[in-house]
Amino acid sequence: MSKFTSFLRPLIEAYILYQKASDRWNESDEYLLLTFDRYCKNKYPEETKLSQEMVDSWCRKRETETNNSCRSRIYPIISFIRYLRKRKKASITEPIIPQSEPRTYIPHSFTETELKNFFAACDSIPSSPKTEEQLSRRITIPVYFRLLYSSGIRTYEARMLKCKDVDLINGILNIRYSKGHAQHFIVLHDSMLKLMGQYDIEISKQYPNRTYFFPARNDSFHRRAWVQNNFRAMWDICNKTYTTAYALRHNYAIENINQWIGMGFSFDDKLLYLSRSMGHNALESTRYYYSLVPGLADILEDRSGDDMIIPEVEYNEDL
């Protein structure tokens, strides 16, 4: 049975099929399409055609939203509208998308002790009660969070990683469509590749024909709350500071940049490699991390004689 129940059901289902056939479907968009579908059904129960009012009222920025959160909420709907317009199935004008706002968030600076404590907690999850979920959790969490730490992959990219996109022979992850539908590849560290190979053997005993590398119930992927709840549970066991799982991605970037200091300077190449491996569409997103690496700006200025080599930019992951 379809999850969609409004008059938009056949149009949304056709749109999803089209996106999947084009290999551009992002599973996380389904929830937002579903909420829009329910909104139309509940607020406009007698309507049989999509109207400008429906779209504008849904896409209007809410008082509780930032520009960036509004953009994230409405973009799948705007993409759906573009699909309808191209096929002359709607004459709706696209709503104005709020301008992206630079983020000034400063990520947590992990200490070696904090990371050691965190991964020790991940490795110490008890096997009881011996439910399917608990057994899966016990072997998944140590691997999932180590993947975030060692590769800089986004939390949802890891959650939605499919088995067919994990090359356990050559150690390459194919991140097909991420932020902005930007496909990129990640080369695993040898130790991470070995760990993922061991995990694959064990998890296959529980989920022999799974679609997702880190499977959840009903051949699905773990939700955002699964990451948040499990990270907090493991982190709070032995650390008193506050941080989030996403900070592991920031740590990956900063640790890489730290290694450039004193290594000689094929700087542009290193920057480009890091940017591509992290799935950034623009180098400006990667440049944000310059300001977080102590002394790097001074070192670059000293070697280049040009203090403009590192522009002051604010962090914007949407780029």
Image (tube, rainbow, N blue to C red):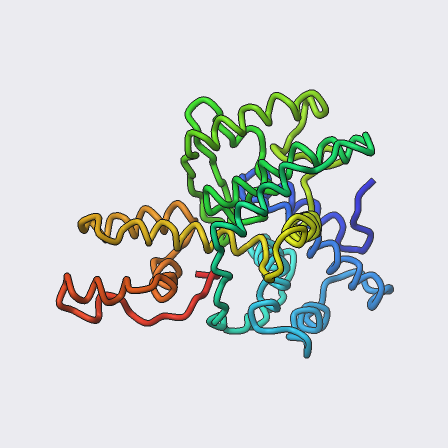
Q: Relative to residue 131, is residue 303 drawn left or right?
A: left
Labels in figure, total: 0
Q: Residue furthest bottom?
A: 63
- What x and y, as percent, mark residue 106? 48, 67
Quarter of the figure that contains the C terminus: bottom left
Tell me: 183 left or right of 220: left
Q: Is residue 212 above or below residue 78?
A: above
The answer to which quarter of the image holds residue 53 is bottom right
> Considering depth in this image, is 170 or 22 the residue closer to the camera?
170
Horizontally, residue 143 falls left or right of residue 32, namely left
Pick the residue in front: 184 or 256.
Answer: 256
Q: Say whether residue 29 is visible.
A: no
Q: Position of residue 134 (x, y in %)?
A: 76, 35
Residue lying at 79% horizontally and 55% vertically, measured from the top left: 7
Q: Quadrant of residue 67?
A: bottom right
Compare residues 59 and 137 and report the one nearer the observer. Answer: 137
Q: Decide: is 181 above or below 207.
A: below
Asked if residue 203 shows in the view, the reply is yes
> Residue 51, percent across and down?
71, 68
Residue at the (15%, 61%) spot, across then down:
303
Image side of residue 46 versus residue 76, left or right? right
Q: Quadrant of the N terminus?
A: top right
Q: Depth check: give the residue in front, 134 or 84.
A: 134
Place of residue 317 in the rendered image (x, y in percent of width and height, measured from the top left):
47, 61
